[in-house]
């Protein structure tokens, strides 16, 4: 019985992280024109991605080891590992390109922040869509 309570607590924490991760992404996108809000909420998004990955660190670490095994490319676990890796890369790309643009005082000629933003948005939507039943069920 004690394990049921612990499992429920872990699921609740994951649900909270999902909610904050998606809400901060949505708010940051909605307030692109209000730079201060966009920056503040964008910086709040990054820790939620980190927490999301840390909550599944053992699984993520094991999945990264599987990336070298071509035989497993089509498995769901392999796709999760790739998606988590893409989430990390795109989030870091957003963070670094956003800081770079802010430091320059204007966007670069190649709109890296916008490109990373679109790719991250697509990744988050696919991530949420594929896990929608699990996310809703685990509330």
Image (cartoon, rainbow, N blue to C red):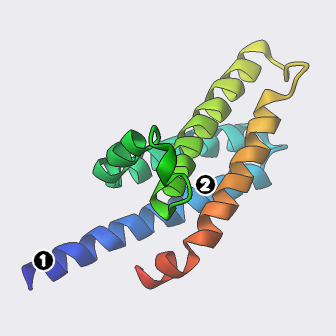
Determine if residue 81 is in view: no
Residue 14 versus residue 86 in the image, above or below: below
Q: The C terminus lies in which quarter of the figure?
A: bottom left
Q: Residue at x 49, y 75 (%)?
A: 135
Location of mark 1 (residue): 3
Q: How many marks?
A: 2
Residue 50 as seen in the image, left or right of residue 21: left
Q: The N terminus lies in which quarter of the figure?
A: bottom left
Q: Residue at x 44, y 60 (%)?
A: 17
Q: Where does residue 98 sit, x and y in percent of width and height? A: 70, 28
Residues under labels 1 and 2: Cα distance?
A: 31 Å
User: Local crowd at mark 2 within 10 Å, few (<14), some, or many (≥20)?
Assistant: many
Q: Where does residue 60 sit, x and y in percent of width and height? A: 38, 48
Q: Where does residue 23 sit, x and y in percent of width and height? A: 61, 61
Q: Nearer the viewer, mark 1 or mark 2?
A: 1
Q: Residue furthest right?
A: 109
Residue 13 versus residue 115 in the image, above or below: below
Location of mark 2 (residue): 24
Q: Residue at x 78, y 55 (%)?
A: 30
Residue 132 as seen in the image, left or right of residue 104: left
Residue 56 as seen in the image, left or right of residue 116: left
Q: Are marks 1 and 2 in contact (CB under 8 Å)?
A: no
> Which corner quadrant of the image does residue 34 belong to?
top right
Q: Where does residue 54 sit, x and y in percent of width and height? A: 35, 47
Determine if residue 65 is in view: yes
Q: Residue furthest front?
A: 71
Q: Nearer the viewer, residue 105 or 50?
A: 50
Residue 93 versus residue 109 in the image, above or below: below
Q: Residue at x 74, y 37 (%)?
A: 116
Q: Residue furthest top?
A: 104
Residue 78 as seen in the image, left or right of residue 34: left
Q: Secondary structure at mark 1?
A: helix
């Amino acid at each position: 019985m004690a394990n049921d309570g612990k499992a429920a607590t872990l699921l609740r924490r994951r649900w909270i992280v999902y909610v904050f991760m998606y809400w901060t992404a949505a708010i940051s996108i909605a307030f692109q024109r209000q730079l201060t809000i966009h920056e503040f909420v964008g910086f709040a998004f990054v820790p939620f991605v980190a927490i999301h990955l840390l909550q599944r660190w053992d699984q993520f670490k094991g999945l990264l080891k599987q990336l070298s095994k071509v035989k497993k490319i089509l498995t769901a676990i392999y796709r999760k590992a790739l998606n988590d890796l893409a989430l990390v890369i795109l989030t870091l790309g957003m963070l670094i390109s956003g800081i770079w643009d802010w430091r320059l005082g204007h966007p670069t000629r190649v709109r890296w922040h916008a490109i990373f933003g679109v790719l991250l948005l697509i990744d988050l939507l696919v991530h949420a869509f594929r896990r929608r039943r699990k996310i809703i069920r685990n509330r």
